[in-house]
Amino acid sequence: MPTPRKKPLPHLPFNIPSTAKQIAKYRKMRALTQLELSEKTGISQDTISTYEQGRVHLSDEIIIRLALALKITPNDLLGFTNIKQQKNDVSPNLRLTRRMDQINKLPINDQKALLRTIDAYLKGSFSQ
């Protein structure tokens, strides 16, 4: 068992988001539930929840499994992304993403009709 440090580690000179927040962020960006992520990784849903709450440190194997399932690099998961890129990251609304998936499954004529309706609604709501 490792012995406790006598002296704390020095503070890092840059801000890195917690891995727990990164897991939740990328899971939501991919419109996955914890259960769906657990099925992709082979990790139980309870354990995924524990990781997202930051109660446990991740092993290298878990980081790799999560990164592969979320289609990101381990560096992304650990928070080592470009700061400019982080500012531009906007996680889509989960409900909206699921609706878009449903729309993609519609026949093309129904998709076009739905998009015309959305365009008309948006045009009317922004012109007021």
Image (spheres, grey):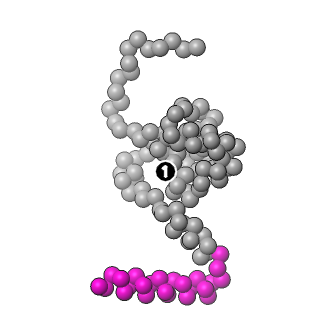
Relative to 109, is 64 above or below? Answer: above
**Residue lying furthest left in this view?**
128
User: Can residue 5 be seen?
Assistant: yes
Relative to 19, is 98 above or below? Answer: below
Circle 1 is placed at which residue position?
Answer: 25
Relative to 13, is 6 above or below? Answer: above
Q: Does the magenta portion include 118?
A: yes
User: Can residue 75 be seen?
Assistant: no
Residue 110 appears in which quarter of the rendering?
Answer: bottom right
- Placement of the C terminus among the 4 image quadrants: bottom left
Three-letter amino acid code at the position of disc 1: Lys
Q: Does the magenta portion include 51?
A: no
Q: Position of residue 43 (x, y in %)?
A: 67, 41
- Placement of the N terminus among the 4 image quadrants: top right
Between 87 and 91, the one nearer to me in the picture: 91
Which structural element holds mark 1?
helix
Q: Which residue occupies 51% across, 48% down? A: 24
Q: Which residue occupies 69% across, 49% down? A: 39
Q: Position of residue 117 (x, y in %)?
A: 49, 86
Q: Position of residue 105 (x, y in %)?
A: 65, 75
Q: What stretch is highlighted in magenta?
A: 105-128
Q: Which residue occupies 59% across, 54% down? A: 33
Please rate how many residues cluster around mark 1, counting C-alpha atoms within 10 Å: few if below 14, some from 14 to 19, many from 20. some
Residue 64 appears in which quarter of the rendering?
Answer: top right
Relative to 67, is 56 above or below? Answer: above
Q: Is residue 37 left or right of residue 8?
A: right
Count numbered badges in the picture.
1
Q: Where is residue 34 in the image (x, y as percent from the top left)?
A: 60, 50
**Most common secondary structure along the magenta stretch:** helix
Q: Is residue 117 left or right of residue 108?
A: left
